[in-house]
Amino acid sequence: MAQEYAIAQPQGFKNHIENVAIVGAAGYSGKYIVEELLRNGKQNVTAITREGGTSQMPAGIDVKKVNYDDHAALTEALRGQDALIITMGVRAPPEQQTKLIEAAAAAGVPWVLPNEFGNDNANESLRTDVMVNAVKTQYREHIEKLGKSSWIGIACGFWYEFSLGGGPDTYGFDFKNRSLVLFDDGNQAISTSTLPQVGRGVANLLGLKILREHEDDKSPCLSDFKNKFAYIASFVVNQRQMLESVLRVTETEEKDWKITHEPTKERYERGNEMFKAGNYAGMRISMYTRNFYPNQDGNFAVTRGLDNDKLGLPKEDMDEYTKLAIQWATDDIPILDDVRKAAAKKHILPSQVAFEISSEVKFKDMPFRPAERRQAIEAVLGPEALQTDISAGSGYSRAYHEAIRTIARTILSKPRYFAEFVYCNHDVVRSKMPFTLGRLETVVAMETLADISRYSYPMPGPEPKPLLITPPSG
């Protein structure tokens, strides 16, 4: 196809992306994308969300609530948009993305970034061996078949801080027990990105001009990525280099850690067998391990080359994100400081109590274990916390409910605990949970806690009225 230039386009041609719609603006990766789009200040940003959704959207963007089953309404919501970004969890209904793609085509949206954030899905063997990769192909093909939009996939690898802190099933680290499983010898590098870098990558990509101005213009443009992947990474790193960062951050030595080895192919097969037997953790094991194969499949910095320079992405400090990963993996979560302040300002719980409750509760196989939670609350608040208090909206005291909210917020801010809860109760979470992960601005409503209660602690009495808890800033 001949190279197109902006200078040859008809009068009125707009050589930049002006309006961007995003699905999942308050989600785990979406919020970073929105932050960077707003920071760049080049586009008007609109969040597309379901009718009845209660997620708290970032300030500075428009919000359109739509019934995804209403094609006409969804098309109208996308009309006038230059790009649609789709970010969704792996357990989102598969037809949801199809409906969005079809509405984008009907609305004439020229660019779609499908829910394609992660591995190099242009790699056929990696796409075949990893289930979550394989299913994404249909969406790119559907966009091309409709012929109204062009797609761009974001190959960013696994999220570094999320994966490093995700337990031994992901990058092999168990921070609470100071253990590490090295895949083979631990020297196979992969390409991995932080969440902020993903946000910058998407925002800077959409900030490029669409076409080069003329034939002497050699600067990058959006059309370079038409129906292709953009490859970005924060770090090209192996497990041993991750360990070196961990040792610096924790001020420990290698002798302080229990280090074992497992062959990557055996580990990958073990994960597959676990998943076939109904253990969802097996999917995580096989998915992550496959990227550490010694054939460089997980290191697209080598096999494809990175677009970091084209997109103006900065170098990052790995130790900074290693520290964050360790905070996520343990109970040392900065969010607790803000929760303490919020509780103290509301004069409901002493500031230290909120911290102690969250620290006392030990989450093992399942994060919502009623006996452990009740024991921890009673130990901190005393038996009176479990006495009836009608003003609290149910059969337990107001202090008890505030403690529950604090614990719920803390759990939901930790990716590992959230993931475990989703795997066990994904239908409830998908349809009822109004919160944004990792953000203190999360809205925690009583209806959310009522849903949690069905799997954790009894809540006698009438259904409580929604009570929104929005911690103060500063």
Image: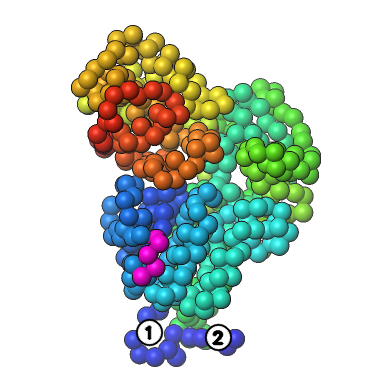
Q: Is residue 182 left or right of residue 313?
A: right
Q: Residue 273 versus residue 311: which sits nearer the camera? A: 273
Picture coordinates of residue 292, whole percent (x, y): 71, 47
Q: Main secondary structure of the magenta part?
A: loop
Residue 6, image x, y percentages: 44, 85
x%, y% of residue 408? 39, 30
- Dot 2 lies on which element? loop
- The residue that disc 2 covers is 3
Pick the front one: 108 or 342: 108
Q: Amino acid at mark 1?
A: Phe
Q: Quadrant of residue 77?
A: bottom left
- Answer left or right for 225 relative to 255: left
Q: Earlier in the sequence, mark 1 or mark 2?
A: 2
Check disc 2 and give the amino acid type: Gln
What residue is disc 1 on? 13
Quarter of the N terminus within the rendering: bottom right
Q: Residue at x 47, y 27 (%)?
A: 368
In magenta, the rendered stretch is: 68-72
